[in-house]
Image (tube, coloured by chain):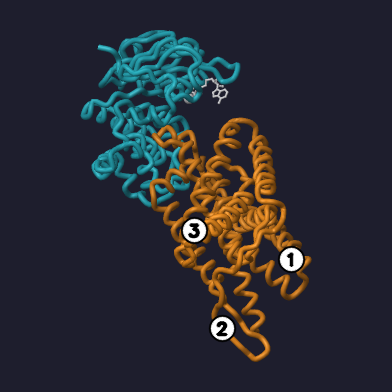
Amino acid sequence: MTALLEIRKLEAAYGRVVALKGIDLDVKAGEIVTLIGANGAGKSTLMMTIFGYPRARAGTIRFDGRDITAMPAHEIAKLHIAQSPEGRRIFSRMTVFENLQMGASISDPQHFDDNIARIFALFPRLKERINQRGGTLSGGEQQMLAIGRALMSRPRLLLLDEPSLGLAPLLAKQIFKAIRTLNEQDGLAVFLVEQNAFHALKLAHRGYVMVNGAITLSGSGEDLLKRPEVRAAYLEGGH
Amino acid sequence: MEYFVQQLINGVTLGSIYGLIALGYTMVYGIIGMINFAHGDIFMVGAFLALIAFVVLTSLGITAIPLALLLVLLIAMALTALYGWAVERVAYRPLRHSFRLAPLISAIGMSIVLQNFVQVAQGARVKPLPPLIEGGITLLDNGTFRVELSYVQILIVVTTVALMAVFTWLITRTRLGRDMRACEQDMRMTSLLGVNVDRTISLTFVFGAALAAVAGIMYLLYYGVVDFYMGFVAGVKAFTAAVLGGIGSLPGAMLGGLLIGLIETFWSAYFSIEYKDVAAFSILVIVLIFLPTGILGRPEVEKV
Ligand SMILES: Nc1ncnc2c1ncn2[C@@H]1O[C@H](COP(=O)(O)OP(=O)(O)OP(=O)(O)O)[C@@H](O)[C@H]1O
Ligand SMILES: [Mg+2]
């Protein structure tokens, strides 16, 4: 079976700064895949290159067998790939409700009520804040909103860039639990970038390690957790 | 007293026209952060298209005023919207990712193109339109001075209020309006959610131009003349109005338009007509010193 997301020999650059140097990576249907790596390794770039920001210089990106390497971002979104990007990027002058409406741009309006109910079940806090402006939410609430907004499109593949960043441990745990629930109940495929390598590798079926724009290691989550080079670089000093 | 009331009526009428033009400046600025310097000329094109439409309709024998007016409104709005769309497509979109000044220079170029095109095509002389809607209501009469509210003035103010209401609804309540606001805040994120950003920007120009066309028709009905240069003067005033009200804010554009219209009218009535623009711009400067984002501009209080 071919993977849901299939990345081959992908290269991308910002001007003359090459950020991705020939990436091969797969996310299969129903899988949680995590990507770990140091600051500046190119993780966020990979997430954004899937949507063409920046455009791939070489290589291919396929989704569900279809070449999306050169597709406009909004067309890619219509294939039900959703992203909660680095820095959350919620619409700060819009209410929580409007942010979720934006997330539902590509989904059938008939399912709007169902979708929003699902998200409120996952993050009850958002329901309490429904008419509050995004910019006035706390950092954790903004993170929930960014994930909720991505889920409003009923994605087949969810890209999460550091969803636990800046969250209290308890809240981070909640978010990881939510990811697992979505994966187990709905079979949602998740591609997760995380600083918190320990939690990410425990949660994921498979993982990749990125160093300086290239994948240096890959394997099952448990495998990677045991690898001395992973432990030394990303796990020492606790979780 | 009577004189004052008359000036108030005149000021509000003029202000409504400025406000309608200012809406286009503010919408475009809101979405792409750029002053569309060609917008005043779009207004001028709208007025010319209306004049041509009136002449054509008259020659076709359509002379019933309400019907002719409605048709002119539709024709001028549609064609002017097309101009607005084309300006964005030709002059701004290719430069969207280049350095900040490039689209500004392109805008000034576009403004010159439109002015000269109309000058060559229509001639440099002022073109008149015989008054279509005559008469009005006498509100006050003290024997020496009569306060007149003309039907044209009523039409202008009522149309403006109605359009303002429709646009507020569009921006705050509809999907398209929400997409526009999202583009204003974060274009890239908006596209990640499946919204066609280019299309949303195009529609913003289309709506702004359609509003400018309405302003052009109102101007034509009110003053009865058009010329190729009118867009520059009115454009600068409307731009000032948008900045005064707080650029990016729709109610701000309307308020700014009204204020500029009132200042100009009262200054001409009580002081000197030569200095009316000086007065309007001085007030702009004073307001901006104390309220740098304009009267209704949003203070930036955002977490990032
Ligand atoms: N817009 C940009 N323009 C130029 N260079 C950039 C840009 N964005 C990222 N880079 C560079 O590309 C490289 C990869 O950055 P990226 O944001 O993908 O790293 P990351 O792995 O997500 O890091 P972090 O863990 O800190 O989020 C870095 O060297 C960074 O400086
Ligand atoms: Mg990153």
Q: Are marks 1 and 2 on the same chain?
A: yes
Q: Which mark is residue B139?
A: 2
Q: Which mark is residue B276?
A: 1
Residue type, numbered disc 3: Leu
Judging from the image, mark 2 belongs to the subunit labelled: B
List x then y, in percent, for residue A69: 42, 19
Please name the residue shown 71% across and 62% down the image: B280
Judging from the image, mark 3 belongs to the subunit labelled: B
> How many residues crowd mark 3 within 10 Å: few (<14), some (14–19), many (20+)?
few
Residue underneath mark 3: B60
List x then y, in percent, for residue A84: 40, 32
Between marks 3 and 2, how big is the CA–CA gap?
Answer: 37 Å
Q: Are marks 1 and 3 on the same chain?
A: yes
Q: Is residue B215 left or right of residue A132?
A: right
Does ligand 1 reach within 8 Å of label 2's beta carbon? no
Between marks 1 and 3, how big is the CA–CA gap?
Answer: 42 Å
Camera-nearest residue between B81 and B288: B81
Q: Secondary structure at mark 2?
A: strand
